[in-house]
Image: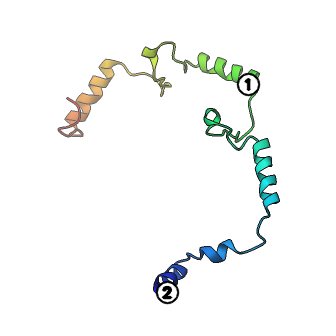
């Protein structure tokens, strides 16, 4: 048993020593911390509010969200129907089918395609 305890201590497992460092919290201090956490909404009161959401940055106003929505619509980034999903933002100029075929023919002629690429 002593070998196990010695090995645990050598590997940084000194739980009893770590737990006893510093002043222990009183029951009153723990209850005060719990009350403060409940007041801040950090303790769920039931299944309906689990997990607790804590805002992690500045919130946006309704006007900010409306402006962002209008910009997204103007840029064509919103789906109008399920057929439009997922939205893909334009990656530049579109290429015609004929141009794609020409590029494929050039790549074949140059030996740039392997047996698994292109047809």
Q: Residues within 10 Å of mark 1 (few under 14, many from 20)?
A: few
Q: Is residue 113 left or right of residue 34?
A: left
Name the secondary structure under disc 2: helix
**Of 17 and 78, which appears nearest the observer?**
17
| Residue tagged 2 | 2
Q: Foreground mark, 2 or 1?
A: 2
Q: Residues within 10 Å of mark 2 (few under 14, many from 20)?
A: few
Figure coloring: rainbow
Residue at 55 percent across and 81 percent down: it is 9
55 vs 3: above or below: above
Q: Position of residue 88 (x, y in %)?
A: 47, 25
Q: Is residue 110 left or right of residue 15?
A: left
**Of 69 and 5, which appears nearest the observer?**
5
Q: Position of residue 112 (x, y in %)?
A: 24, 40
Q: Position of residue 16 (x, y in %)?
A: 62, 75
| Residue tagged 1 | 64
């Amino acid at each position: 048993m002593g070998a196990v305890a010695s090995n645990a201590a050598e590997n940084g497992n000194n739980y009893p020593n770590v737990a006893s460092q510093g002043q222990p919290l009183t029951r009153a201090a723990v209850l005060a911390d719990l009350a403060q956490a409940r007041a801040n909404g950090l303790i769920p009161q039931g299944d309906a509010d689990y997990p607790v959401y804590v805002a992690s940055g500045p919130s946006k106003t309704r006007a900010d969200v409306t402006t962002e929505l209008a910009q997204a619509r103007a840029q064509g980034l919103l789906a109008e129907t399920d057929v439009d999903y997922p939205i893909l933002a334009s990656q530049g100029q579109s290429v015609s089918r004929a141009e794609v075929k020409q590029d494929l023919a050039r790549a074949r002629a140059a030996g740039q395609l392997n047996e698994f690429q292109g047809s």
